[in-house]
Amino acid sequence: MKRLMLFAALVAWSGMAGAVVYKWVDAQGKVQYGDRPPDGVHAEVVELLGTHAARPAPVRAPESTALRATNRDQPNQEDAAAAKKAVLDDVEHTRQKQCADAQDRYTKLIEGRRLFKTGADGERQYLTSEEIDSERVNAKREIDAVCNSPT
């Protein structure tokens, strides 16, 4: 009987663990929770017991933004500035990732003993000393170009 109760509890818990719960503030300023947030409010996903990564909440535009979107005659400078900042942040993030990748490649070329490239048939083709030196120079140039560029 205990096993049956444990099994039933685990089945019920597993169903709840997969549910998404949203948190938002209503018009009266009270915090509300539910499986579907109302339209026009900013809602965030609540991380539940047993979940490791928060799932992104669906983006719902507030009513004031929806009204602005219908009136295309007046461009909103705040939205343009926010979009420009988001693009610049994305560019910076990508540049940092490319820089880290270039530095990792250079480090592997410097520290590696027997370097190779994979051939068309999938076999290793070991590089000569001259080819390794050439790859190292190219990797250093890539670091200088990607990591030291102003943008």
Image (cartoon, rainbow, N blue to C red):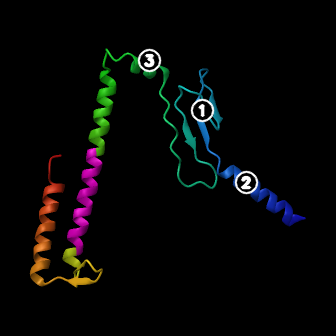
Which secondary structure lies at badge 1? Answer: loop
Q: Quadrant of the N terminus?
A: bottom right
35 lies left or right of 139 = right
At which x and y percent is residue 9? Answer: 79, 57
45 lies left or right of 94 = right
For label 1, the residue is 37
> In the image, what residue type sits under mark 1?
Pro
Magenta run includes residue 137? no
Q: Earlier in the sequence, mark 3 or mark 2?
A: 2
Q: Is residue 140 visible?
A: yes
For disc 1, the neighbor class at 10 Å (few under 14, some 14 to 19, many from 20) is many
Say if 135 sits above or below 43 in the image. below
Q: Which mark is residue 13?
A: 2
Image point (47%, 27%), residue name: 61
Camera-side residue: 75 or 148? 75
> In the image, what residue type sits under mark 3?
Leu
How many marks can you see?
Answer: 3
Which secondary structure lies at badge 2? Answer: helix
Disc nearest the viewer among 3 and 2: 3
Report, in whole angstroms, how far the alpha carbon at label 2 lies from the one at label 1: 23 Å
Q: Main secondary structure of the magenta part?
A: helix
Q: Earlier in the sequence, mark 2 or mark 1?
A: 2
Q: Which residues are magenta?
A: 91-108
> In the image, what residue type sits under mark 2?
Trp
Image point (22%, 83%), residue name: 125
For label 3, the residue is 67
For disc 2, the neighbor class at 10 Å (few under 14, some 14 to 19, many from 20) is few
Image point (64%, 51%), residue name: 18
Q: Quadrant of residue 88?
A: top left
Q: Are marks 2 and 1 in contact (CB under 8 Å)?
A: no
